[in-house]
Image: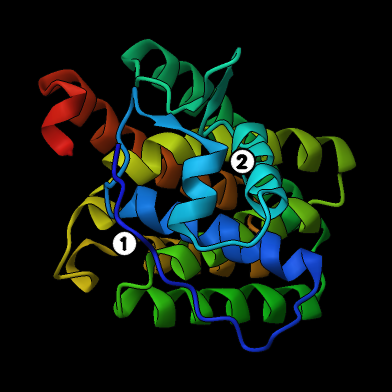
Amino acid sequence: MYTSMVTLKHPGQTMAKKNLEEIAYDAIMKLIFEHHFKPGDLLLETELTEMLKMRSRTPVRHALTRLEARGFIIKMKKKGCMIPSPSPEDAKAVFFAREHIEGLNAASAAENCLPEDIVDLRRVVEKESEHGSIGNKVAYSKVNEAFHSEVAKKSKNKYLFQYSRHIFWRSSYYTFFFESYYTHKTDYQQHMQAPLQHLAIIDAIENKDTGKAEELMKAHIRNSYDEIFSRISMHPADRFF
């Protein structure tokens, strides 16, 4: 396990509990993105609190709970939390479900969207490009999630929205560990394909082309899966860390 100290600069002596939890979450995610942790590693609440120089374990505990809910870690009885090992079979199941659910999201969004919805989506992709081009992986991942979440909201179907959130979170485990944008330390724009694909999806939604919106979204997710699956299948997981 990585044990170096991580210095967090707090903007003041007091900070809202929610902000401390967000700081802890972002810091742990940054450590994961930088591959200080790998599948099979234990994440211990006490060690992380010390690493992040937090005065209380509570923000770290809540951050770990959030990571567990999103499928990044699993709780081990009396041992803390562990990053699970990747599985080609699990990746296939996750991305199959995500492809079809999010394809329906895009089609429904094309059918139900309003002009202001398109403005919202384009604004999200603009932020995504800004963060992605400078290699801010934590911010980029959040805005990437926001795009998919916004498309789900624009579908105006609460059930699709609910299911797509959970499947997105689970698929993110594979994205962050195996997709080229997150695994490369330089040449971020070369590996940043999502914003352009997202813009094409928005165009189809704006044009009310339900079939094209669905197919572009499915192809977008399939592209991620194809890259991830090939990397898991061809190499042992520890080759990436």
Q: Name the secondary structure under disc 1.
A: loop
Rendered image quadrant of residue 100: top right
- Residue 19 location (% of width, % of height): 72, 70
* Left or right position of 160 against 195: right
Q: Nearer the viewer, residue 204 or 28?
A: 28
Quote the CA–CA distance across marks 2 and 1: 29 Å
The residue at the point 71 percent across, 46 percent down is: 62
- Residue 153 location (% of width, % of height): 79, 55
Quarter of the image that includes the C terminus = top left
Residue beneath disc 2? 64
**Number of on-image labels:** 2
Q: Nearer the viewer, residue 214 or 195?
A: 195
Q: Residue furthest bottom?
A: 12
Amino acid found under the numbered disc labelled 2: Leu
Residue beneath disc 1? 193
Q: Earlier in the sequence, mark 2 or mark 1?
A: 2
